[in-house]
Image (cartoon, rainbow, N blue to C red):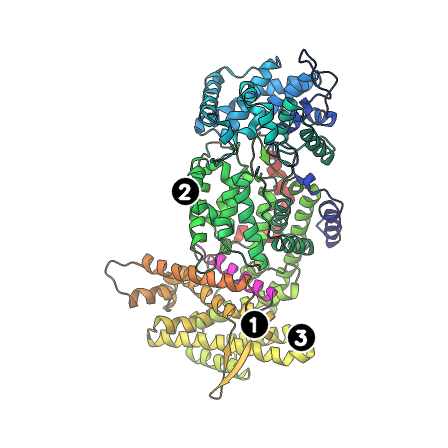
Amino acid sequence: MGSSLCLVQSLVFEVQKELFSDNINIQSFVSPSAYDTAWLAMIPAENLNSQNQCRGGPMFESSLNWVINNQKEGGFWGESDVGGHLPTIDVLPATLVCMVALKKWNRGRTNINKGLAFIESKTAEEILLKLYEYQNLPRWFVLVFTAAIELAEAAALEVVFQENLRGPIADIFFKRRQILSMENKALEKLETGSCHLPLLSYLEALPMSSIHDFGEQEITKRLNYDGSFFQSPSATARAYMATYNVNCLSYLESLVQNFPDGGVPAKYPVDEELINLCMVDHLQRLGLGELFHKEMDQILHRIHSDERQNYSFGDALPMKLFKDALTFRLLRMKGYYQNPESFCWFLNDAKVMVHMQENPEQFISAMYSVFTATDISFPGESKSDKARIFARIILQTATMFDDFEDHNFVISNGLRNVMKYEMDVPWTARLDHLNHRKWIEESNKSPLWVGKASFYRLSCLDNKKLAQLAVENYEYRQSMYRQELEEMRRWSEEGGLSKMGFGRDKTDYSYYAIAASSCHPFNSIMRLAMAKAATIVVFADDFYDMEGSVSELHLLTTAIQRWEGEGLTGHSKTIFDALDDFINKFVANFPSHEGSKTVANLRNIWSETFTSWMVEKTWSLMGYVASMDEYLENAAISIAIHTIALPTTSSFLKLSSSNGTQNLEYHEITKLLMTIARLLNDSQSYQKEEEEEGKMNFVHLHMKQNPNPKACVEDSIGHVNQILEEKMKEFMEHIFMEGDNSMPKSCRQLHLSCMKLFHMFYNSANNFDSDTALVDDIKKAIYLPIRKIHTCNQAGG
């Protein structure tokens, strides 16, 4: 049974209760860390006796129970890749430390045996060997993994690694000695001067000799105001066992109270603004923005109003950069003024940039956040351009080690696939509907960033009801789209358009592009109006280009200018009648007092468009070569994107009289849209138009008017792309920033949708004229359900 609106609405209500209720503890949205939970489970309920033996049981029984109850099927503790059971690199230290906690209290013998079997397994061998082959073992892994091995040995656990791992493990211990010798020279300076987390934040992983040398007073002196040691539960647990400081205890007790099931996160507290930002971003990417717009608007308004920098001294560099870029993107898309310097600050620090280049795997999510933030650049923002180039380099470097065929133990397949897709296909060429599908299928559990000893994830992003809602909502849209496409086909056939027998019948393409790019997914009237306008444009344009005689075209152009169809016959009459019927039926949706004005506006728009086609035909027959400016002035109209974008915003079209003739004056956003659409088309259709239709094209005009013996068509295309880049930035600024006499936001977003569909058609090829290029995408957008594909992905890992 297909998705229904009733089910979607029911799920929205349930998700609102789970994620947005006033009594929700937002810190509970942070996923637990097996590594940190195990450290809390080691804390004894009472102090040690004189023989250094534990009296009583664990202080936090719930944490110990969590360890017992949350071992994965493969015998490990920690994270696994999206949809499967393939572990990430944090499972090695996490599994060792969890077994130590169980052994300490003589609990979970079965769990320990499974854990030991995993450590000895081929899976653990594969993780370690491939990481070792990568030759860039993360600093955090070196520190916590070696310490975990020592803990296991001290606890008399019979840990046995594969024979061929002895050499790599010995090398990892050697790397730890190097780290400690370099960073342990002056403990009092360890909190500053490094891009890494301070060495002391790994207190639980430091050798006992270092802790004793450092001293109880020095540990106490460095406690945070909340009693934590670098806001790290594991480090604070170790600090408490070394000092029994009451402030440490208060922090740990508060931590357990906020996570009553016993599983604690890798950092506490986590910036609540960051959690909220991640929720907003996730909801948008799932295609649920329209369903939670009030909650999302409140979050973004609150964050924009709060000018405080919500960071603590325990925050890692990747976390800060991740948040800064995410904040910039979400607030800019909402229309709030944002300075690129707010996330491009890393470009001013050569040391930080070198650190990122040397440790790319630690900055995958942060650089992905930076890269997507630069999607929305305005004119003059050179820092944003530089940040985009740098982020692309880091992401490409971090995803190069794809020798990990099934997964790479650092980032999930889903996140890797999404990153590659977004680097290959510009944001402006991706249709929202299919973007939502890709995010639902591939990236629902991707980590935010690598922490001190585990991956930071938000459990709210893996909410089962939210995932179900995303699928049901997508498939409900598909059911609407299928019905509307059938209506489009009937309309095209009954109006005689699809029976004319020439040119391109792009009814399906036109509807798909409008539906998949629409910013108003539930506005059927608007969607059908735009799709019908696009279909008429294609048939009429082809009639002028390839079928109509000069006399027929003159008659049709004159008829449209006068809006009088008497005397028309054949294809001319079919086109005129279809257009007249379309306008009259569309205007019937408006209040009666607006009808006559809207009819006049729409007729004028179409009249101007038909006239521009006649001008092009005349130029072609005469062999007239227009100047580039003259060509672009007419061609921006003949591309006819405004006939698609403006029907629902026709009340914003200004009419002015000049010398007794009526001219159309468009909003700057519409002018930019028309120019961008024309240049996108010309950059991919120049060969077809010259060889098959004999039409002028901006690419050819540039070559003719800038003769250079060494120049080639690629140079002219490069010139067009340079203009496009500048126009795109101007367009984005008009779309997202409120200006004087600006269009309402919904109308600006509609213009953005039209630009994206044109960019999709003409991104790297002329997909519009291809009969097969978009077939698979149309199936995914309208016909193929997500549920079956998503289930297959989960089963296959």
User: According to the image, label 2 marks what residue?
Assistant: 350
First-in-chain label (1 vs 3)? 3
Looking at the rendered structure, the kind of residue marked 1 is Asn
The magenta span reads 742-766
Q: Are marks 1 and 2 in contact (CB under 8 Å)?
A: no
Question: Where residue 213 appears, x then y in whole percent?
Answer: 54, 20
Is residue 746 part of the magenta span, yes or no? yes
Please, is residue 103 above or below residue 31 in the view?
above
Please, is residue 247 above or below residue 350 in the view?
above
Q: For the residues carrying marks 1 and 3, which lies nearer the camera in this image?
A: 1
Q: Main secondary structure of the magenta part?
A: helix
Q: Quadrant for the C terminus, please.
A: top right
Q: Secondary structure at mark 3?
A: loop
Residue at (59, 38) in percent of width and height = 793
User: According to the image, label 1 marks what residue?
Assistant: 741
Q: CA distance from mark 1 to mark 3?
A: 28 Å
User: According to the image, label 3 marks what residue?
Assistant: 588
- Can residue 73 be seen at all in this image of the molecule? no
Q: Are marks 1 and 3 in contact (CB under 8 Å)?
A: no
Give 600 or 187, whichever is nearer the viewer: 187
Please, is residue 751 above or below residue 140 in the view?
below
Q: Secondary structure at mark 1?
A: loop
Q: For the residues carrying marks 3 and 2, which lies nearer the camera in this image?
A: 2
